[in-house]
C-alpha cells in the first residue's frame, strides 16, 4: 500500500465516522474536491491540517492511526 492510498483510506474512514461526504469535507475544509479525487501523490501537510480541523482531531492523531504504525510503505 502506498502512502497516498493510506491517506485516502484514513480520510474515507474519518468521513464515514463523522457522517460526512467527501464533497462536504471539501466544502468545510476549503480544499477543492478535485484534490480529494485526484489521489495526489504527495498530499500537502496544509491540506491534511485542514481535514484534521474539520474532523476535530490533531495531526498527531491523524498520523498516529494503527494503519500508519503497521505499514511499510511501497513507493
Image: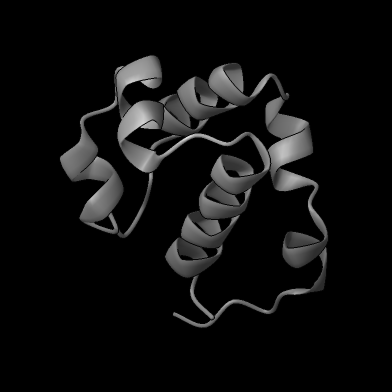
Question: Taking 10 as reference, is 22 left or right?
Answer: left
Figure check: 67 above or below 46: below
Question: Taking 56 as reference, is 50 left or right?
Answer: left
The color scheme shown is one colour
Q: Residue furthest left?
A: 34
Q: Residue furthest front?
A: 19
Image coordinates for residue 48, horizontal then vertical, percent: 49, 33
Q: Nearer the viewer, residue 73 or 30?
A: 30
Q: Residue at x 52, y 52 (%)?
A: 12
Image coordinates for residue 37, horizontal then vertical, percent: 24, 53
Q: Residue at x 69, y 19 (%)?
A: 56
Q: Nearer the viewer, residue 21 or 51?
A: 21
Q: Nearer the viewer, residue 24 or 1?
A: 24
Question: Taking 25 as reference, is 64 left or right?
Answer: right
Quadrant the C terminus occupies: bottom left
Image coordinates for residue 68, horizontal then vertical, percent: 73, 61
Numbered-mark total: 0
Figure check: 1 above or below 60: below
Q: Residue at x 58, y 36 (%)?
A: 19
Figure check: 58 above or below 5: above
Image coordinates for residue 62, horizontal then vertical, percent: 69, 40
Question: Taking 5 as reference, is 73 left or right?
Answer: right
Quadrant the N terminus occupies: bottom right
Quarter assignment of residue 26? top left
Q: Residue at x 63, y 34 (%)?
A: 18
Amino acid at each position: 500500500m502506498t502512502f497516498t492510498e493510506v491517506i485516502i483510506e484514513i480520510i474515507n474512514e474519518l468521513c464515514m465516522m463523522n457522517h460526512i461526504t467527501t464533497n462536504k469535507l471539501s466544502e468545510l475544509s476549503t480544499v477543492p474536491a478535485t484534490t480529494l479525487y485526484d489521489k495526489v501523490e504527495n498530499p500537502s501537510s496544509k491540506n491534511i491540517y485542514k481535514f484534521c480541523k474539520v474532523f476535530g482531531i490533531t495531526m498527531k492523531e491523524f498520523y498516529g492511526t494503527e494503519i500508519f504504525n503497521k505499514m511499510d510503505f511501497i513507493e
